[in-house]
């Protein structure tokens, strides 16, 4: 099954906690602190796998979690880092932040990779908190949480040439003739509901990748008829073959068809309309086509666009069309530089010391990820640890913010499930 869009949730690993430990060797009666650091949490990395063609792997599994880092150990031994989680995607995968729609990565070439969710840093062991006045610290830091976010994966097929046009004009038939692709073909609209790829090899030895883009209709740029799902596959092509039914058997005017499809391309992206085009006037084997073909050739001559009369049913004109396309493609590729229209957005990680203060009656409530980590790191039976806790609150601006909001002596401050009574410059453990 061809899947070209998926939304998944990512959770990077948490860093391991630092260790509280002391040297216990028999000949070292007053051993100092010897707690190791926690390991880094695993990150989630996307990497291009040229053997993949769809996002099928992400259709049913929506949650991806990287391993946590290992906690620190005694004897100053650090915990192991969490193993990174590598998610493999096909060439042409675009990654967007689900919340904002901003572009995080555009992975095109084999081996391209991007760290999308960063693992949390490991906590420091008690070794790091030894000072001249604090010889035996009985506290360590907990590990940080890793990034957590939802992303949308979109696949834009990598093809040199794209076949565009209204439904049922013969695009799939052309693809089946000139490549080994085997698209579903029938004489009704929207036979093709997914893009198909094939490699064209001309009689002169040239080769390129051709994509059959499902038929477009008016309003496709707004998503009508799955327009957005189809149009994004044209983005990376270097040249377009516009297939037009010149037989007139469906009552449409070929010239009108040409302009309507180009209007949809332009409304979706101004870059698309700037791509070189060749027109394949299909179904010339049907008698009514002669008048329509002449009018189309005269109209497109004004735009300097070549028109190739072809019949996908009888192979008439196919060799001439693709020999010309191969030559044109060589000229384009000499000066071709793929442009990324959108600016790559670096996922904005929340400030690790971000916090908010709210007030409910006489209780000040402080919330923030680093406070959770700080609480977990604090040994409330140790005055040294409690002093470190108080200093961190001052250092990170929590005390100043509480005073700014009107905190006075005797007021209660709540962090997680613990309440403190504020007394001038100290916060005493209350409950």
Image (cartoon, grey):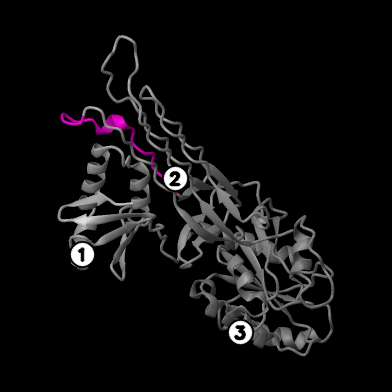
Check if residue 292 falls in the magenta segment: no
Q: Residue at x 57, y 77 (%)?
A: 265
Q: Splitting the image into 4 quarters, where does residue 166 fall? A: bottom right
N-terminal-most mark, 3 or 2:
2
Q: From the viewer's perspective, is 415 left or right of 112?
A: left
Q: Is residue 384 above or below residue 182?
A: above
Q: x, y (%) of residue 216? A: 67, 77
Question: How many neighbours does mark 3 have within 10 angstroms: few (below 14), some (14-19), or many (20 or more)?
Answer: few
Task: Farthest residue to the top: give it.
Answer: 27
Q: Which residue is mark 3?
A: 259
Q: Which residue is mark 1?
A: 407
Q: From the viewer's perspective, is 147 left or right of 65?
A: left
Q: Quadrant of the N terminus?
A: bottom right
Helix, strand, or loop for circle 3?
A: helix
Which-is-in-front pick, marks 3 and 1?
Answer: 1
Q: Which residue is mark 2?
A: 119
Q: Residue at x 41, y 45 (%)?
A: 120
């Amino acid at each position: 099954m061809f899947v070209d869009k998926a939304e998944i949730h990512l959770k990077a690993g948490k860093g391991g906690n630092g260790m509280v430990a002391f040297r216990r060797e028999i000949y070292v009666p007053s051993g100092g602190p010897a707690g190791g650091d926690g390991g880094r949490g695993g990150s989630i990395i996307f990497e291009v796998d040229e053997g993949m063609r769809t996002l099928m792997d992400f259709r049913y599994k929506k949650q991806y979690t990287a391993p946590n880092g290992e906690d620190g150990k005694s004897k100053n031994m650090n915990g192991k880092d969490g193993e990174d989680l590598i998610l493999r995607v096909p060439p042409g995968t675009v990654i967007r932040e689900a919340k904002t729609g901003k572009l995080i990565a555009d992975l095109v070439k084999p081996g391209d990779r991007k760290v999308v969710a960063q693992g949390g840093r490991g906590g420091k062991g008690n070794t790091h908190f030894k000072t001249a006045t604090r010889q035996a610290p009985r506290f360590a830091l907990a590990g940080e949480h890793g990034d957590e976010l939802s992303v949308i994966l979109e696949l834009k097929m990598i093809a040199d040439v794209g076949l565009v046009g209204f439904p049922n004009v013969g695009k799939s038939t052309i693809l089946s003739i000139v490549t080994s692709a085997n698209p579903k073909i029938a004489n009704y609209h929207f036979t093709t509901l997914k893009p198909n790829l094939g490699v064209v090899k001309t009689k002169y030895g040239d080769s390129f990748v051709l994509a059959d883009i499902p038929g477009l209709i008016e309003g496709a740029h707004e998503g009508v008829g799955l327009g957005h799902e189809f149009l994004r596959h044209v983005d990376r092509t270097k040249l377009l073959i516009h297939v037009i039914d010149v037989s007139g058997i469906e009552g449409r005017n070929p010239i009108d068809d040409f302009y309507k499809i180009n209007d949809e391309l332009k409304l979706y992206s101004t870059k698309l309309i700037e791509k070189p085009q060749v027109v394949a006037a299909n179904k010339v084997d049907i008698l009514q086509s002669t008048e329509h073909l002449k009018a189309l050739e005269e109209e497109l001559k004004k735009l300097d666009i070549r028109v190739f009369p072809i019949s996908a049913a009888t192979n008439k004109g196919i060799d001439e069309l693709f020999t010309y396309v191969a030559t044109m493609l060589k000229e384009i590729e000499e000066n071709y530089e793929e442009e990324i229209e959108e600016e790559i957005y670096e996922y904005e990680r929340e400030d690790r010391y971000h916090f908010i203060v709210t007030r409910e009656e006489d209780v000040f409530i402080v919330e923030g990820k680093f406070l959770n980590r700080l609480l977990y790191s604090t040994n409330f039976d140790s005055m040294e640890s409690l002093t470190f806790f108080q200093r961190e609150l001052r250092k990170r601006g929590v005390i100043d913010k509480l005073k700014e909001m009107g905190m006075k002596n005797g007021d209660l401050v709540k962090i997680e499930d613990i309440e403190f009574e504020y007394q001038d410059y100290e916060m005493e453990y209350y409950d």
